[in-house]
Image (spheres, rainbow, N blue to C red):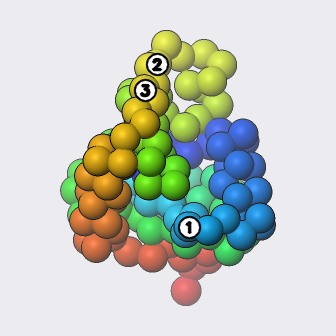
Amino acid sequence: MQAYRFTSPPIVGALVAAQRRGVDVDVAVLLDRVNDRDEEIGREAPRGRYTGATFVANAGIPVWIDDSKRIAHIKAIIIHKRLTIGGSYNYTISAEQRNVEDVTFIESALIANRSLANWNARRSVSRVYALSSP
């Protein structure tokens, strides 16, 4: 999964459930720096708050912070290298309850593989999410 903001309880729960089931592919998360509880970024700083990133990391899911650009605004979920979910939809409580956002489901191994290649490219310039300050 790749996200700008990540506070959606159903999506957090689904990722943790998949990890616990031991799905046959890796469950991993790549997030923008606004999800990093140790980063100060103006009014968006989650410093010290328990975030979706913290929750999934505590469940054993690898999390990276994509902070090599000003904003990492990609929202994508790739499932079984076959289904890609993306669009303007942020994986947040606000997107679910208050905003008007779109989401697209594409069932295509070709698109999923291209999305996964992009995910891997972004991960390669990202840093591992730290659960607590050093």
Q: Residue at x 72, y 41 (%)?
A: 9
Q: Residue at x 55, y 37 (%)?
A: 91
Distance between the Cα atoms at labels 2 and 3?
10 Å
The amino acid marked with disc number 1 is: Val
Question: Could you tell me residue 122's position as x and y percent?
Answer: 28, 62
Res. 35 in view:
no
Q: To which residue does mark 1 refer?
A: 25
Residue 61, image quadrant: bottom right
Pointer 3 with pointer 1, Cβ within 8 A? no
Question: Considering depth in this image, is 5 or 88 the residue closer to the camera?
Answer: 88
Distance between the Cα atoms at labels 2 and 1?
28 Å
Q: To which residue does mark 3 refer?
A: 104
Pointer 2 with pointer 3, Cβ within 8 A? no
The amino acid marked with disc number 3 is: Thr
Which dot, 3 or 1, sits closer to the camera? 1
Question: Could you tell me residue 88's position as x and y percent?
Answer: 39, 27
| Pointer 2 or 1: first along the chain | 1
Res. 59 in view:
yes
Q: To which residue does mark 2 refer?
A: 101
- Residue 76 vs 103, above or below: the answer is below
Q: Residue furthest bottom?
A: 134
Which quadrant does the C terminus fall into?
bottom right
